[in-house]
Amino acid sequence: MASLAGSAAALLSGCAGQYPQSTLDPASGFGSQLSDLFGTIFWWAVVVFVVVEAVLVYAVIRYRARPGQEGKPKPVHGHTALEIAWTLAPAVILLFIAVPTISTIFRVDGTPESGALEVEVVGHQWWWEFKYPEYGIITANELHVPVGRPLALSMTSVDVIHSFWVPRLGGKRDVIQGRTTRLALTPDSVGMYLGQCAEFCGESHANMRTRVFVDSEADFDAWVARQLTPAPPVDSLEGLVRQGAEAFTKIRDPANYSCLICHKVEPIAFGAIGPNLTHVGGRTTIAGGTIPNTPEGLRRWLRNPPGEKPGDLPGRSMPKVDLTDEEIEALVAFLQSLN
Amino acid sequence: MPAVTSAKRSGVWSWITTTDHKRIGILYGVTAFIFFLMGGVEALIIRAQLAAPNNTLVDAETYNQLFTMHGTTMVFLAIMPLSAAFFNYMIPLQIGARDVAFPRLNAFSYWVFLFGGLFLSSSFLFGAAPNGGWFGYANLTSRAYSPGLNIDFWVLGLQVLGIASIAAGINFIVTIVNLRAPGMTLMRMPVFTWMSLVTQFIVVTAFPVITVALIFLMFDRFFGTNFYNVAAGGDLLLWQHLFWLFGHPEVYILILPTMGMVSEVLPTFSRKPLFGYAVVVYSGVLIGVMGWGVWSHHMFATGLGPVADSVFSATTMLIAIPTGVKIFNWIATMWGGRLELKTPMLFAIGFIAMFIIGGLSGVMHSSPPSDLQQTDTYFVVAHIHYVLVGGAIMGIMSGIYYWWPKMFGKVLNEGMGKAHWLFMVIGINLSFFPMHFIGLLGMPRRIYTYDTQLGLDTMNLVSTIGAFILGGSFLIFLYNVWWTRKNGLQAGNDPWGGATLEWAVSSPPPEYNFSVTPRVSSRLPLWTANGLNEIPEVPPEPVHVPGGTYWPILTAAGILALAVGAIMHSLWIVLGGAGFMVLCVYRWAFEPFEV
């Protein structure tokens, strides 16, 4: 127990660098408020735990039956003053928890700060879509935001309930069809933050991950500029990349096996069911943040998407299309070029 | 003079037609324990899958079925009916009654529970076990997102089980209110009976709520209504409000009976009356009432707004007070006593020690901002398992070791009992304590796979090892049961020196329970001089015990047919089942009084 308490203290003090989804190593004001409040409650809980368990253990040892004892223990039926005391004691401790709790509730209720970067988050089985109305950018699974600028997320779902959670940036918020929920936070350090869907959303719930890149001002501006550049027209492409673009735009049988039915690559494909791939080459992962965006990762994914991300959603999940090896190589080259 | 009994006391038929509360209690106990072992095996497969990152022991779909069935089984088919086993066996004995108020309804409850449990579990045979989580959030459970039979099994099975619970709830309320022996005022009732009474009131008020939610879902799935269809104007939070309006009282349905058991065991083995009896009783009543005002603390992440969050946070914190008061009174009961550390007592102490941890993590969840980092993570998994395994199951094991001699006439082996306890305590803490950290370090619940980059491989492996130790501890218990059948010490009427009425009769008690009507003049009749009239070994005059009846099991079969017909989309089976059920109820109602 002592070592556990020790590791708890170590965790709370923040040496959680090897835990990329730690809630105890916050990188935003929102996250810090939650972990500070948790710390307050945690230490009260530790005090209560130690005192009550110690009294319990003491009572067991002190009053255990020993051989040779005679007579009966005194039949005490109760004690009014004690009852009042141990009703009031927890009430007082709870006050020390309730007051900071309620003041924190009103500080972290999701109201955006002025000048915040608005991002619309849309939950899909099983990937995240991010829209930046300010810039007209639509991307998937990887969110880029500038450091130090308030961020306002307004979130909804097109299907089942999801929950958007990037632990180091703060608490989770459910993402519900027919409702708009909000999170407001200001990331305070540059870096990459892992998150994943926290509300069970069906077969591949475990594969619905996300990455938030908190960029410096300059990096963010450069990223925005890249996102605003359309992909080159097919005619201007050459070699394998061109073959890939043709494979991407080929109408297959059945039609929903065609890439362009679901995916968008401006200006050559305008599907809206799956992630926008216009700048997919610039992302670090594919497939709901589960597979590295490398030629090998793309090959794995294109060969058998349901094998990588289980779950059959007719008309919504990526089917297994019998692509030839040549087509796969061409598509890999094309997708890698989209940056 | 022998008692007059008109039913044969042996053979399968006598068990099928029994209306004896003691036999029904044993049926509940055995059935629930088998479901408990099933739920345990499901848990071990889950833990084996999570022993290593990116493991492929089971696939995503199987994993989702396993955790859904683990939760559903443990809540509805294991812990609730294990408590029901003791309601059945012990309440009539503790209040000095011949049987429950409605013995045939009691049999009916058991058979409906059994059929409902078999129906739900048979889904595995079709590869279509429920897969939407034990609280089955809409709209994942709608036909559009869960087209298979999985959720059909869940929505129908839970409705069947609800019938069993409500019927039993009414039966026990009437029994406890009306059938108490002369002199047993409410404030002389054993605390187990008191907590059971509170539990039954929660059952009959909370189960209709989930029944409404389930009927909405069934109508959506079978008849195309739109209760949980956003496109048609539905609101998905409706399900969550209805489910948790049931679901949080349900937590107290699971824990209050075991709080009652512990309140019996602690005084017996401390050789000292329960400290603050009235306070323990009132705090239990208060928990039962306040349990209705906290449900939205399961929904802090849905964004209900700061005012609602604050209110539900405050009510949730308040409920910690009566819970804490109970713990303090239990410790005060031991204080100054002479603690006989027999197996039931060890489990009761273990219950307190573990329940404190579960209670404290509960207080952490009561703070919405703190909860935003904990809900839907392994931290919550740790919390519910400290409450339900460290709490409810520990308490139930305390009750099993305590009352086993009363039920079967032989005392379970102490050495094996203590070994069971030791391994269970180690298993619980090794399995569930690391989950607090696994959750705080960012692992959501209900994921069949996790990446090694989360840094949680070792902690997950430790947790898995703990789960297998916990599971293994029950092999010791099973062997103990087997061993005790032949080699156990004869119990006599009162092996532990208990104070309550069940210890005044032989072990196991005769079919008629008490040879004469007990007259009680004390809260602790067996510890008080002249607390109870003489209960002779042989009844002074013949006692009539009613014979068996097969109408309850047949009526229950009619209800099963309704569920089977619905899942097969066969109107004829549904109508046949309904007609058969009505016929059986009619025959039941007009069954001759004397058989």
Image: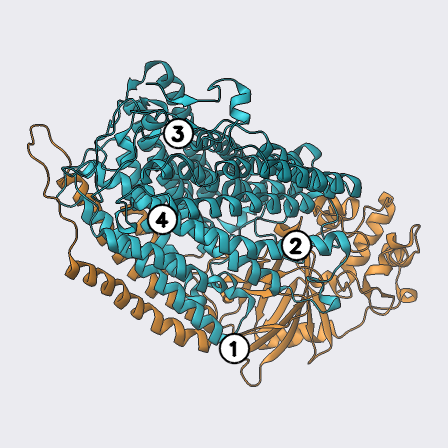
For the residues carrying marks 1 and 3, which lies nearer the camera in this image? 3
Q: Chain of mark 2?
A: B
Q: Position of residue B284 (x, y in %)?
A: 34, 54
Q: Who is closer to the viewer here, B68 or B577? A: B577
> For the residue carrying disc 2, how many other residues have a C-alpha within 10 Å: few (<14), some (14-19), or many (20+)?
some
Local secondary structure at mark 2: helix
Chain A: its colour in the image is orange
Q: How is the image coloured?
A: by chain
Q: Which chain is cyan?
A: B
| Chain letter for the residue marked with disc 3 in the picture | B
Mark 3 vs mark 2: in front: 2
Labels 2 and 4 within one chain: yes
Up/down of B27 relative to B242, above or below: above
Residue at x 39%, y 43% (from the top left corner): B392
- Tell me the SS state at disc 4: helix
Q: Give the residue pinned by disc 1.
A: A148
Q: Going from the N terminus, do you reach mark 4 or mark 3 first? A: 4
Q: Whole-percent x and y of residue B427?
A: 39, 36
State whether residue B426 appears in this view.
no
Give the vertical position of B212 relative to A33 (above or below): above
Q: Residue flagged by tag 3: what amino acid is it? A: Ser
Judging by the rendered image, the residue that carries numbered circle 3 is B473
In the rendered image, which residue does mark 4 sit on? B195
